[in-house]
Amino acid sequence: MKDGATRGFKVVEEVVEAVVVAVVEAVVVDVVVVAAVVVVVVHVVVVVVVVVVVVVIVVVKEVAEVVLVVVVVVVVVVIVVVVQEMHLKSLLTYQIQQHIANMNIIQI
């Protein structure tokens, strides 16, 4: 009977050891899979963040260039309008002065 009990304990011990090994391997595999998934997710997030930052930089640069061009065009148009207005005022003043001078000559 002692041999049977010893054999029974050995079988139970082997079964328990096999179950423990299987559980540990499953947990290790699960931890490795979870770690791999986390690494992949982190890499994907990093890539997405980098892409978003690059897109934002490109868009801001393009918008800044467009805004700069618009500002330059507006400034040039304002300068041209102001210069033309000054020229027209001086021309009108000159014509008024000539007209007054001609009237004075006629009156004399």
Image: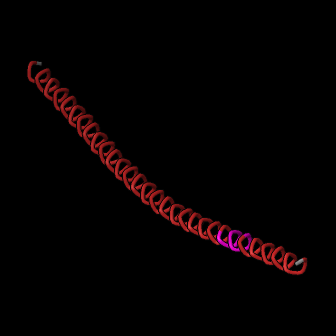
- In the image, residue 35 sits, relative to residue 55, either above or below, namely above
- Quarter residue 31 falls in: top left
The quadrant in which the N terminus is found is top left
Residue at 23% x, 35% y is 24
Magenta stretch contains residue 84: yes
Q: Nearer the viewer, residue 95 or 51?
A: 95
- Quarter residue 97 falls in: bottom right
Magenta stretch contains residue 47: no
- In the image, residue 93 sits, relative to residue 40, either above or below, namely below
Q: Which residues are magenta?
A: 83-89
Give how far across and how far down residue 86 sits, in percent. 68, 69
Residue at 50% x, 58% y is 60
Give how far across and how far down residue 63 sits, in percent. 54, 62
Q: Is residue 101 left or right of residue 82?
A: right
Q: Is residue 40 left or right of residue 88?
A: left
Q: Is residue 103 left or right of residue 24?
A: right
The quadrant in which the C terminus is found is bottom right
- In the image, residue 7 sits, relative to residue 71, either above or below, namely above
